[in-house]
Image (spheres, grey):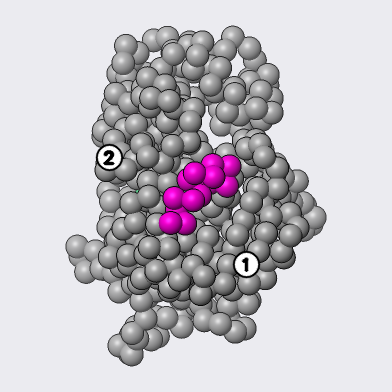
Amino acid sequence: MALPPGPPIPAIAQTIAFILRPAQFIEWCRKKYGDIFTIDTLMFGREVEIVNPDLVKQVFTTDPDIARAGEANEILAPLVGHYSVLLLDGREHVRQRKLMMPPFHGEHVLGYGQIMRDITEKTVANWPAGVPFSMHPSAQHITLEVILRTVFGAEEGAQLNDLRDALTAILDQLSNPIKAIGQIPKFRKTFFGLTPWDDFLKAVAHADKLIYRQIARRRAESETGSTQRKDVLTMLLAARDEEDKGMTDQELRDELVTLLVAGHETTATMLCWAFDLILSHPDVYTKLLEELQSAGGAHADLTAINRLPYLDATIKEVLRFRPVIPAVGRRLKQPVQIGEYEIPAGEMLVPVIWLTQHASDVYPDAATFKPERFIDAKPDLYSWYPFGGGSRRCLGMAFALYEMKVILSAILTHANLKKAKPELSRVQLRGFTFVPHDGAQVVMTSRRPASVIA
Ligand code: HEM
């Protein structure tokens, strides 16, 4: 059984090309080999890359017990833990996902809008005027605070500060390129507390202590029936499976860390791409402002924001044009026929979100950023899939889309922004994600008084 063709160069050369120019490398492969090809990199191993929506559909509709996403995410185990919904497959995945769904339903996430708006407004109030700055730290700050408040249910004060410090220490281990080397399975070595892996384990142990304390606090409240809270942790504590069993503390800890890892940097990066693109397209910027203004500006109703057609279309187009997670993986437990190839057990099938969403035979004028393409048009499940697909589609999709709407509208209605440099940011690989190389550099030319826009 031959695998689909791919670059006839050693894995090390493919790795270098992928690190230096990730988007160009995969685009070159697609041009040369078509809709299904094989690449091999030191970070991710051998992968069968899939582009055409019909083939993507085949992958996402294959029995999830055969095309396994949990196994494909195994590298995250030391951080998110073995009960993480990201790592489970089969019946265990179905159970855990069902338990986690209620707080992530569209209606429920609307209840988090005010927290999202308040956090954004406070952040914008600290921006300097007239000097270039990177959007990334602010976006990270906002999305971390949102998760601390809405998912962990942390309250202002020492509790929030300690948890923030502990979780930032873990996230720093992942995003700092030197420290991230310690994450590569081969380098996971302890040596008298001196290695990057030792630092990582210490950071996780410290964060775990605080997370378990938070779980105990909320569990005590839930047991006395005294809570009116709507945070995700409180809802997870109340969730019961078909045998009327709830989650253990270990399961809760693993899911909280999963939500942090899955929902923090992804949303922060999407916000950076959103500003990079919107500010580079004055017509889009103007239309967004007009729409927000007619909805009530800085004081627009938070539920109405969720239904603004141009804002919705713009976010969908940002996710098409710059999907932060460029590809998703499924490890095969048994051979599967994809197109004309029978792919053997053990191989990794990878629908490449980036390539499908940039294919000119899928999207007319694919290289142009054009929100209008999503006005009155529901995206197709297998040609627009920035949140992945099938039974593993992002659990936080409604949360993330709403969060992006609230944050974008709060920023746009409070600050006049322009790009620091005219050209679009270059795509850089960081971990599993595609990020703007400069964090999206912007300048706030002036503050918008609420009275002008409202
Ligand atoms: C713009 C922001 C986001 C993007 C682009 C994104 C994208 C993704 C993708 C591509 C997957 C893998 C799906 C697959 O394998 O088919 C995923 C899974 C997941 N995401 Fe997101 N995500 C975002 C935000 C969030 C947020 C805010 C949360 C929660 C707070 C979240 C929670 C999860 C979880 C729990 C999973 C695992 C689902 C499962 O395995 O069943 N994500 N996400």
Judge whether residue 282 is colored magenta: yes
Rendered residue at 19%/62% (across/down): 242
Quick check: 66 above or below 220? above
Whether residue 428 is visible: no
Q: Is residue 184 above or below residue 272?
A: above
Q: Is residue 176 magenta?
A: no
- 430 sits left or right of 80 in the view: right
Residue at image mark 2: 377
The image shows a total of numbered marks equal to 2
User: Which of pointers 1 and 2 indicates the residue nearer the eye?
Assistant: 1
Foreground residue, 242 or 179? 179
Q: Position of residue 30 (x, y in %)?
A: 49, 17
Q: Residue at position x 50%, y 14% from top?
A: 31
Question: Measuring 56% from the left and 31% from the top, which residue is drawn there?
Answer: 44
Boundaries of the magenta span: 277-290
Q: Locate residue 254 relative to residue 305 in the image: left or right.
A: right
Quarter where residue 383 is shown? top left
Q: In this view, which residue lies farthest toward the left?
A: 242
Is the residue 414 above or below the residue 198 in the image?
below
- Tag 2 or tag 1, which sits nearer the N-term? 2
Q: Nearer the viewer, residue 431 or 217?
A: 431
Neighbours of disc 1 within 10 Å: few (<14), some (14-19), many (20+): some
